């Protein structure tokens, strides 16, 4: 109990000293002053819990001291010492807020008891206050966890803050990034409804000042008395206020304000501390609720887009269990949302054949995978699917978003085109074969024919071959466009593949008097595991190009190859033709692409040979490319697998 500070104020030195002596003896920390003026001076320097003051003093008397203490130091208590006969004054002092009075002369122990009682009251009041703060802070925390609605949360917080601090009103403003203004979002007190929605610029009035400076502002008494704000209009009866910036991660996002009218005491430093704790707690809650409401809005937006999508869309978890699906999916897959949610996607697409197995999809590293689903039962339905993997920051798969597009019409059209081309090519090919087939028969009779007839026959043969090669290319095109190529793979000798291919284009080689050399080492390299006809086709195309684009007198082609590693061999087909400009090296593998010069029809071709060769090499897992310099001939390379 010792150490509490008591200030004894009396102009009568005897009484003053007696009190001081006694209190010191009882281990109080005692101050003394002989007048009201001196007492107020001392109070400015030091804090005293109890001011024991004489009532009648010249100058500032006991009532004057009492009023000042009540106003400036509301936590301190005043005990009045009064002479018998001035009891009415003592009663008045009680009304003004004195803790008690004691009539002189008094037994010194009586004073001791009174002081003890007063200190005990203060201790209890403090405890109650603390408890109240704790309860209120607890309330705020509760609000944090239970209120995610921002408006509700803000009005709850401002009400709690006003109640806890015994304020007459208050408001919470949030900083609006778009307009750069503070907007009142919640308020309490008389002017509550009027102020909501009011906007303030940063720097404007007290709240704007606190926001701009990021500092706490405490106004004691009228705003007019504060040099910072003396030019501002004072709002009705507001007499004292605390304004605290709400910060989150050092960034201002709002302001909390409380105020009292002149009927109440001004706010103390302790009130500021309390509101600061409150503000810090509330900032977390407001930030969370703000985040939550933004997320909620975003989620609603996304859901609306998701629902309204014309394409089917499904969101699954990592195990392909369906989390969300839209109504277009219900129609496309002929399923019901309620039946699907929470269940595995694979259960609902049993009637579809997929162009990629689900295990393959799972294993693929790419973020986005495209594949097709084709319905195997009932009416034809082709779905093109884009599956996007969703991963967390550590790369762990969280789920997938799959978008399904109905491409039945497009696919059907493609099929019709392909079938048509296929049909036409076959229909053209048969009579052509017959015509060319009869040519040797006529050539037999060459000896009896005249010169011009001979020439006609040669033209027929040459043009017939060109036409036949075009028809072959068209057939190849239909092959190129086909999604799936059936493969008949077997182990074959590379040299024999090359020889068969050359036989197929024997006429072209002969007509052009080209010299095609097969490297002697080709017979020694490992066998390849390929579809014979397809790779022969690749070789035919490359040798044909090497000859037909070659305008040298002696057209030379060299075919060689070597083993790269235990998986692949590499083939090379080199010519002494005109070469290909480097910027064209990649383009020539595109469909219908021809280097400008040949586009004019100088050399027969339609730009399908290389894309076809590329497709055929790639279905075997190999690669194809060209190396060439203008004027120095070209070399085409491709790799082929040795095993599966
Ligand atoms: P096409 O032979 O039907 O024109 P390709 O796809 O086979 O079509 O070839 C595309 C283009 O690449 C050709 O038009 C030609 O310009 C060029 N090209 C291909 N091979 C050679 C080659 N060996 N030498 C020079 N140019 C070539």
Image (cartoon, rainbow, N blue to C red):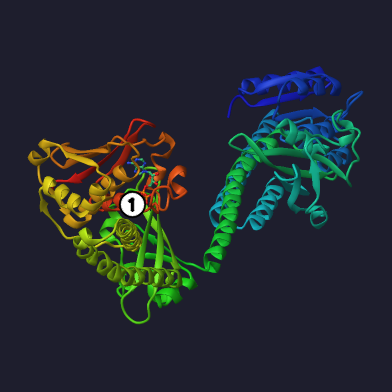
Residue 387 visible, this angle: yes
Residue 266 visible, this angle: no
Left or right: where 570 falls relative to 88: left
The location of residue 400, given as percent across then percent down, is 39, 57
Q: Image height check: is 334 above or below 384?
A: below
User: Extreme left residue here?
Assistant: 524
Q: Quadrant of ligand 1?
A: top left
Which quadrant would residue 401 be assigned to in this image? bottom left
Identify the residue at image location x=10%, y=51%: 492
Q: Nearer the viewer, residue 55 or 148?
A: 148
Count of picture labels: 1
Identify the residue at image location x=77%, y=24%: 43
Quarter in which the N terminus is drawn: top right
Left or right: where 398 falls relative to 45: left
Which quadrant would residue 332 be assigned to in this image? bottom left
Q: Which residue is mark 1?
A: 609
Q: Nearer the viewer, residue 244 or 394?
A: 394
The location of residue 240, given as percent across then percent down, is 81, 39
Q: Nearer the viewer, residue 395 or 72?
A: 395
Left or right: where 138 falls relative to 166: left
Secondary structure of residue under mark 1 = helix
Badge 1 local density, few (<14 within 10 Å), some, or many (20+)? many
Label 1 near ligand 1 (CB < 8 Å): yes
The location of residue 213, given as percent across then percent down, is 73, 30
Q: Nearer the viewer, residue 597 or 128?
A: 597
Which quadrant would residue 38 be assigned to in this image? top right
């Amino acid at each position: 109990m010792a150490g509490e500070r008591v200030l004894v104020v009396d102009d009568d030195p005897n009484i003053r000293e007696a009190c001081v002596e006694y209190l010191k003896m009882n281990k109080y920390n005692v101050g003394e002053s002989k007048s009201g003026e001196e007492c107020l001076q001392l109070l400015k320097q030091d804090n005293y819990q109890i001011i024991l003051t004489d009532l009648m003093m010249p100058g500032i008397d006991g009532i004057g001291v009492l009023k000042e203490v009540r106003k400036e130091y509301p936590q301190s208590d005043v005990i009045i010492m009064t002479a018998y006969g001035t009891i009415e004054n003592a009663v008045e002092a009680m009304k003004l807020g004195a803790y008690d009075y004691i009539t002189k002369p008094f037994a010194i122990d009586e004073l001791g008891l009174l002081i003890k009682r007063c200190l005990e009251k203060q201790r209890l009041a403090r405890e109650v206050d603390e408890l109240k703060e704790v309860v209120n802070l607890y309330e705020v925390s509760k609000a944090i966890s239970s209120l995610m609605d921002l408006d509700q949360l803000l009005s709850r917080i401002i009400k709690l803050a006003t109640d806890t601090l015994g304020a007459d009103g208050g408001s919470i403003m949030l900083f609006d990034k778009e307009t750069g203004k503070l907007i009142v979002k919640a308020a309490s007190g008389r002017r509550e409804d009027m102020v909501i929605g009011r906007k303030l610029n940063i720097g404007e009035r007290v709240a704007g000042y606190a926001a701009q400076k990021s500092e706490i502002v405490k106004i004691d008494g009228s705003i007019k008395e504060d040099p910072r704000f003396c030019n501002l209009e004072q709002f009705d009866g507001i007499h004292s206020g605390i304004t605290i910036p709400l910060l989150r991660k050092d960034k201002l996002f709002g302001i909390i304000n409380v105020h009292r009218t002149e009927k109440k005491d001004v706010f103390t430093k302790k009130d500021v501390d309390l509101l600061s704790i409150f503000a810090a707690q509330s900032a977390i809650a407001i930030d969370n609720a703000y985040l939550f409401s933004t997320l909620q809005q975003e989620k609603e937006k996304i859901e609306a887009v998701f629902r309204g999508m014309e394409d089917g869309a499904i969101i699954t978890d990592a195990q392909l269990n369906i989390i969300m699906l839209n109504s277009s999916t219900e129609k496309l897959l002929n399923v019901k949302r309620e039946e699907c949610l929470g269940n595995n996607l694979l259960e609902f697409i049993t009637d579809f054949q997929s162009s990629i197995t689900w295990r393959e999809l799972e294993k693929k590293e790419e973020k986005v995978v495209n594949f097709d689903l084709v319905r195997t039962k009932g009416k034809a339905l082709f779905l093109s699917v884009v599956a996007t993997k969703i991963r967390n920051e550590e790369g762990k798969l969280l789920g997938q978003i799959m978008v399904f597009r109905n491409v039945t019409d497009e696919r059907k059209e493609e099929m019709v085109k392909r079938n048509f081309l296929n049909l036409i090519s076959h229909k053209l090919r048969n009579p052509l074969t017959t015509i060319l087939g009869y040519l040797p028969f006529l050539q037999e009779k060459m000896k009896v024919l005249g010169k011009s007839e001979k020439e006609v026959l040669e033209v027929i043969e040459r043009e017939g071959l060109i036409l036949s090669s075009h028809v072959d290319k068209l057939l190849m095109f239909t092959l190129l466009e086909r999604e799936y190529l059936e493969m008949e793979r077997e182990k074959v000798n590379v040299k024999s593949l090359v020889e068969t291919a050359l036989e197929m284009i024997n006429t072209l080689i002969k007509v052009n008097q080209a010299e095609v050399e097969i490297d002697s080492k080709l017979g020694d390299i490992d066998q390849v595991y390929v579809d014979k006809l397809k790779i022969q086709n690749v070789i035919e195309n490359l040798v044909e190009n090497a000859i037909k684009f070659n305008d040298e007198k002696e057209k030379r082609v060299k075919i060689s190859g070597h083993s790269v590693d235990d998986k692949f061999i590499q083939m090379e087909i080199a010519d002494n033709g005109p070469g290909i400009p480097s910027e064209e090296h990649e383009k020539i593998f595109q469909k219908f692409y021809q280097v400008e010069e040949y586009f004019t029809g100088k050399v027969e071709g339609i730009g399908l040979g290389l894309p076809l060769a590329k497709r055929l090499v790639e279905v075997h897992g190999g690669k194809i490319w060209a190396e060439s310099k203008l004027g120095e001939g070209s070399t085409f390379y491709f790799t082929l697998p040795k095993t599966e």
